[in-house]
Amino acid sequence: MLNLNSSSLLPYFTAGWPHPQAFVASVRAAAESGCAAFEVGIPFSDPVADGPVIQKTSSQALQAGVHWGEALRLTRQAVDESGLAAIAMTYCNPLYSLGLERACAELAQAGCQGLIVPDLTLEEGEPMEKAALAAGLDLIYLVAPTTTDARVAEIARRSRGFIYLVSLRGVTGARQDLPADLVQQIQRVRLRTDLPVMVGFGISTPDQAASVASQGAGVIVGSALLRAIGEAPAEQAAEVTRRFLTQMVRAMRPGDVAPAVS
C-alpha cells in the first residue's frame, strides 16, 4: 500500500530514458532527495494525456527497445536500488492487450504498488479495479477541473492510494503560472476524501510546489524534470535529478533538513 501525504513529492520518470543506467540512477537520486515514491511511465506509442516533453521521451525509449518487458525489468531494478515504491502510469491498450490480470500481476512483480491509467473511465473501470486489487495495486483515478462534484465523490470512493488532481485543462507540461482556481480545486477534492490529494500537470518550480503543499496537497512533477534531464548529457541525469528534486523538497518542507544541493 502506498504511503503518501501532503508533503510528498512524486517525480515522474519514463522507464529506460534517457538510457537504462541513467533512468535507474535518477530514481536513486530521487530517493536521496527525499521523495517517498516515483511514478514510472511505461513507454507507449499513443500517450494521449501527455504533452510534448513526455511524448518525446516515450518515443525515444520505444526506439531504444524499452517495451513492456524491458520497462518492467528496469522498474524492478530501480525499486530495488532506491527503496522507493513505484507507481506505474500506462494506458488501457497495453493492459487489455496483455490481459488485465496478467498485466497487473507483472506490474506488481516489478515492484509497482500503484497504477494510473489516464484513459480509464469510471464506467469501464470495474474490471481494472478487480485486477489491480487482486495484484495488490492501488488503482488511482484522476480528477479534472471539469469533473462534477458527484463524480469527484464517486472517484474518491473507488480510488485507492491517493487522488490524482489534474491542475489544468489540457495535457501534461510545465507552466509558468498555476491555474487561478487551483486552491478551490484542491479544497473541493479534500472535502470528499480522506485519501491524500496529489496535484499534477503543469507544476514546474519550487515556488509552485510550495504553494500546492501549503494547501495540504502533494505534488507530481514530470515534464519540467524530464526537460531538465534532457538538456544535460545522459551521464549527468542523476545529478540533475538530485538538484531539481532537492530544491522542490526544500520548498515544500521548509522546516525539514533537506539534503545538500551540490
Image (cartoon, rainbow, N blue to C red):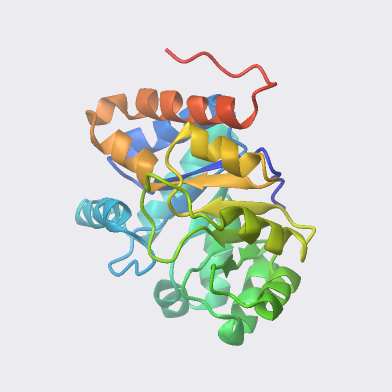
**Residue 19: where, in percent of width, then height?**
28, 40
User: Residue at 47% across / 40% down in the picture?
Assistant: 77
**Residue 40: where, in percent of width, then height?**
46, 50
The residue closer to the viewer here, 249 or 75, is: 249
**Residue 234: where, in percent of width, then height?**
25, 31
User: Residue at 46% across / 46% down in the picture?
Assistant: 203
**Residue 90: where, in percent of width, then height?**
44, 64
The residue closer to the viewer here, 136 or 255, is: 255
User: Residue at 59% across / 59% down in the picture?
Assistant: 164
**Against 200, is 97 above or below?**
below
The residue closer to the viewer here, 152 or 66, is: 152
The answer to whether residue 50 is visible is: yes
The answer to whether residue 161 is visible is: no
Q: Quadrant of the C terminus?
A: top left
Q: Residue furthest bottom?
A: 123
Q: Residue furthest front?
A: 180
User: Residue at 52% across / 13% down in the picture?
Assistant: 260
The residue closer to the viewer here, 80 or 194, is: 194
Please indicate whether residue 53 sits to the left or right of residue 208 in the image. Answer: left
Count the numbered circles shown.
0
**Against 187, is 123 above or below?**
below
